Image (cartoon, grey):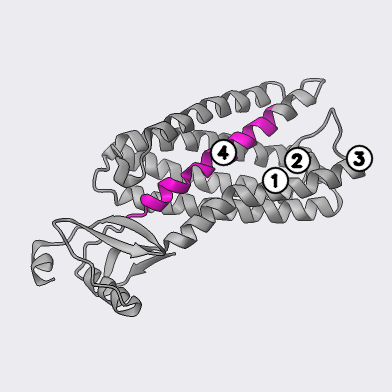
Amino acid sequence: MLQEDRDAPAHLLFDVSLLTMLVVLTWLVPCLTMAVTYPLAIQAGRVHSNDFYISSSIDTGIAQKIGSFGLTVGAEALFICMAVRYCLVSRHPRNTKRALYLNRVGLLLAMLVNVGTVGVGVFNVSYSPVIHQLFAYTAFISVTVYMAIQLIVDVNLRLDKDDGWEPVLFRLRRTIFTSASVCCLGMAATNFHPNQAIPAAFECALMIQVFFYFALWHGLVLRYSHLIISSPTLMTHFTNFAAATGRDSPHVDDAHTHLLYANQTVKIPIQLPNKALSRS
């Protein structure tokens, strides 16, 4: 999915098909996991009308093992997507100092989301409620702040349609973030409420919005998968690809070219020295 050329440290090659699969896994695997663990937990009496936390659905028995596995797979897929986005933003031709700083903060938050989510599955409520909640709130708070940072980064980069920018989807992601923030605060504020159905409802609503937010990354990642290369090895890779697939060699026009890959046309900004362009 992501390769770095030893002779050209800025050379990144993204596999569009694999990125698509990873984006889908970030929300599909956890959803399928919950679809299995909730019926098992309800049957075992662990989940009921006053306690339907996601944590409760993966707390005991086989549901705990399934939940831990599903959350880990989803967390790792999400972290890879976050790491890819970090690489893309750091090499975007219109990035700013503010965007680069926020991008680094976003990577740190991505790590916290990953650790928190895996910790939730490994250290279940029955093992230790305190440790479990520590990991849970680490994941919830980190992912909420991460969404806010990515919205700011998108604005700072002045993305356009070639980057997969869709104003309607951006406004929808912003609305989802606002709602998710309310749910996160509501869950924390009512954590010790006698009626545990209230914080449980906030938690479930928050997770649904998080899944929905990252599901909206699908088109953005596909069209935002840029190759920003500072080496003449660019044309070698493209020419080899063309020879292997029987397609014409890509054409460099100013600082852009197009690569047909996996039936997707991806616009690729490239940064090459003038001498390298003349040799190509």
Which residue is painted at 24% across and 68% down in the image? Answer: 234
Kind of residue indicated by mark 3:
Gly
Element marked by disc 2: helix
Kind of residue indicated by mark 1:
Val
Element marked by disc 3: loop
Which residue is painted at 71% across and 37% down in the image? Answer: 133
Between the C-alphas of marks 4 and 1, the distance is 20 Å
> Residue 44 in magenta?
no
Between the C-alphas of marks 1 and 3, the distance is 20 Å
| Coordinates of residue 237 in the picture (x, y in percent) | 28, 73
| Coordinates of residue 81 in the picture (x, y in percent) | 48, 52
Which residue is painted at 33% across and 56% down in the image? Answer: 266
Which label lies toward us, 4 or 3? 4
> Of marks 3 and 2, which one's residue comes earlier in the chain?
3
> Of marks 1 and 3, which one's residue comes earlier in the chain?
3
Q: Which segment did they paint magenta?
A: 202-226
Asked if the residue at tag 2 contacts the one at tag 1, i.e. Cβ–Cβ closer than 8 Å, the answer is yes
Main secondary structure along the magenta-highlighted residues: helix
Q: Which residue is mark 3?
A: 45
Relative to 196, residue 83 above or below:
below
Element marked by disc 1: helix
Q: Which residue is mark 4?
A: 212
Between the C-alphas of marks 4 and 3, the distance is 29 Å
Q: Which residue is mark 2?
A: 55
Which label lies toward us, 2 or 4? 4
Kind of residue indicated by mark 4:
Phe
* Image disc number at residue 120: 1
Asked if the residue at tag 2 contacts the one at tag 3, i.e. Cβ–Cβ closer than 8 Å, the answer is no
